[in-house]
Image: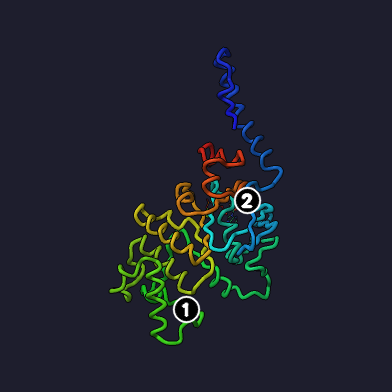
Amino acid sequence: MSNASSNIPDDITKTEKAAIKVAEPAQQDRREAAALEEGKTVGIPFCENPKFQLRNVEVSYGDTPAIRNISLDIARNEVIAFIGPSGCGKSTFLRCLNRMNDSIESCSVRGSLLLDGEDIYDPRRDVVELRARVGMVFQKPNPFPKSIYDNVAYGPRIHGLANRKSDLDDIVEGSLRKAGLWEEVKDRLDATATGMSGGQQQRLCIARAIAVSPEVILMDEPCSALDPIATAKVEELIAEMSESYTIVIVTHSMQQAARVSHRTAYFHLGHLVEVNETNRLFTAPEHELTESYITGRFG
Ligand SMILES: Nc1ncnc2c1ncn2[C@@H]1O[C@H](COP(=O)(O)OP(=O)(O)OP(=O)(O)O)[C@@H](O)[C@H]1O
Ligand SMILES: [Mg+2]
């Protein structure tokens, strides 16, 4: 992408230079608008036999659009990262995938959103069952003020997944093991979960999501409240979990997207600008807005 300042000739006056510099942001805005006008997503937004097939998705809060005509497939067992500047619609789009937006009264969702070929927004759909299939881990760990055991057992209990105490014990242990937390908590399963460290709480929330055997896990900035060690543990977990689940992760860390995801989707002002194989998107982006973002020119 061309950079306006590098085109300024050396023989002009300081005042002229300053005037050119002031004009740059407006020029940048126009370029941005032009780049978004077409509304097409470049790269590889679609795949064969997807887990999610999302077409012409539009989301508004009242009259204000937040997602503008986005189409995307999410493959089975892929880890896809959503990146983009604050307010570009990553969380809004993520929440469409298990109808978490339903609880926001002003929010309306249009378009076709299919999970395994079936309409996510079918009014006859059981939303509790949908959220068991498509679990969610939030930015801030949010364990219930209950024991470690009861946090993990909560979902299996309400979904009737275990008839006997020993079955429930097995699910709790298996989920805590998968979340890499068993060794740290096996001797204090009755302790209250809110007394754990932030990183442990986040892995507990992952264990809680896993306990109902979901097919998909949505993660909205799951590491933003964690230190680098806890972050590394959660990232390891994501890599292991991708063998069994489809994972969609929103992150502000491009390094994290590069480490954990197969494909990365770049959002900008409610548009889906580019979706590409992660390595490609960070080394040779196809869209100039993606390039501007990853090289730190805005965001
Ligand atoms: N509950 C809400 N009510 C009204 N507007 C909302 C609501 N949630 C989000 N928005 C608006 O929708 C747009 C997209 O917000 P969203 O939270 O999806 O962005 P984001 O990409 O996740 O940002 P961040 O990186 O800061 O988390 C923003 O303009 C935001 O102000
Ligand atoms: Mg967000």
Q: Residue at x 48, y 49 (%)?
A: 258
The amino acid at mark 1 is Pro
Q: Point out residue 145 in the picture as x, y percentages from the top left corner.
A: 39, 71
Find residue 44 and name its label: 2
Rendered view: 56 above or below 131:
above
Q: Point out residue 4 in the picture as x, y percentages from the top left corner.
A: 59, 26
The residue wearing badge 1 is 156
Q: Residue at x 41, y 68 (%)?
A: 143
Q: Quadrant of residue 284?
A: top right
Q: Residue at x 57, y 65 (%)?
A: 100
Q: Nearer the viewer, residue 283 or 57?
A: 283
Q: Point out residue 165 in the picture as x, y percentages from the top left corner.
A: 39, 85
The amino acid at mark 2 is Ile
The mark that comes first in sequence, 1 or 2, is 2
How far is disc 1 from disc 2 in space, using C-alphas?
A: 37 Å
Q: Residue furthest bottom?
A: 164
Instruction: Tell me, yes or no, whether the two marked residues, 1 and 2, touch with CB atoms within 8 Å.
Output: no
Q: Quadrant of residue 226?
A: bottom left
Rendered view: 86 above or below 9:
below
Q: Residue at x 50, y 54 (%)?
A: 261
Colour option used: rainbow
